[in-house]
Image (cartoon, coloured by chain):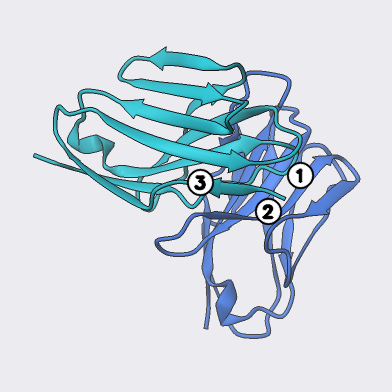
Chain colours: A cyan, B blue
Amino acid sequence: GQNIDQPTEMTATEGAIVQINCTYQTSGFNGLFWYQQHAGEAPTFLSYNVLDGLEEKGRFSSFLSRSKGYSYLLLKELQMKDSASYLCAPSGTALIFGKGTTLSVSS
Amino acid sequence: NAGVTQTPKFRILKIGQSMTLQCTQDMNHNYMYWYRQDPGMGLKLIYYSVGAGITDKGEVPNGYNVSRSTTEDFPLRLELAAPSQTSVYFCASINLAGSGELFFGEGSRLTVL
């Protein structure tokens, strides 16, 4: 089975940096996804980490440690539009998502 | 390419009715998934398929059935709809050997009254 843990809610202000953690226990691990989901919309792809380390994509970076079963999503220079839910999913055959972290960005 | 297409986008059902949510992808992905998302909650995996003719249960399969007769199509059937099945349903597909991106459909909002 799988066990995925993310914080339920986080708050931050515009321009700040926030780190959303994800810990997981799973079998048949291939990589780890991060998705963003705005209310009422389908999730959109942010990153897919296969190897250990940090991958940077503009304001968003994602880190993976396979030995520790740990990942984080780092959001820099926060904007109001970053208010959304952030979902992590360790990739096995059955793609199961964590419950998601709702991020609220205020001015 | 259209990506992942779900129909219908909205549907209201009466308790006990049946219906099928359609999902089609044109990316030749082997892996396909059905999720449901209740208000304010995360995605729950209902069923998934790793290829034509192969399906498997996810986290919350009760009350649903699926089939995968072709690579492109992965319909989700609700038999004897219940109010607990009121939710938004998302279909998704992926080529795990490729870029790793899981492509989602736009979602189907189902209400059972």
- Which quarter of the picture shows residue B75? bottom right
What number is the disc on residue B22?
2
Label 3: how many residues lie within 10 Å, few (<14), some (14-19) or many (20+)? many
Q: Position of residue B93 (x, y in %)?
A: 67, 37
Q: Is residue A18 left or right of residue A90?
A: left
Q: Is residue A55 visible?
A: yes
Q: Chain of mark 2?
A: B
Q: Secondary structure at mark 3?
A: loop
Mark 3: amino acid = Glu
Residue type at mark 2?
Gln
Rendered residue at 73%/70% (across/down): B62
Say which mark, if any, is on residue A100.
none
Q: Is residue B105 above or below residue A49?
A: below
Q: Residue at x 70, y 27 (%)?
A: A30
- The crowding category of the residue bearing disc 1, from other C-alpha atoms within 10 Å (few below 14, some 14 to 19, many at least 20), is some
For the residue labelled by badge 1, is the local secondary structure a helix, a strand or a loop?
loop
Q: Are marks 2 and 3 in contact (CB under 8 Å)?
A: no
Q: Which residue is mark 1?
A: B73
Place residue A25 in its image quadrant: top right
Q: Are marks 1 and 2 in contact (CB under 8 Å)?
A: yes
The Cα atoms of the two marked residues, 2 and 3, are separated by 12 Å
Farthest residue to the left: give it.
Answer: A107
| Left or right: B51, with A39 as reference point | right
The residue pinned by badge 3 equals B106
Both labels 1 and 3 in a single chain:
yes
- At label 1, the amino acid type is Asp
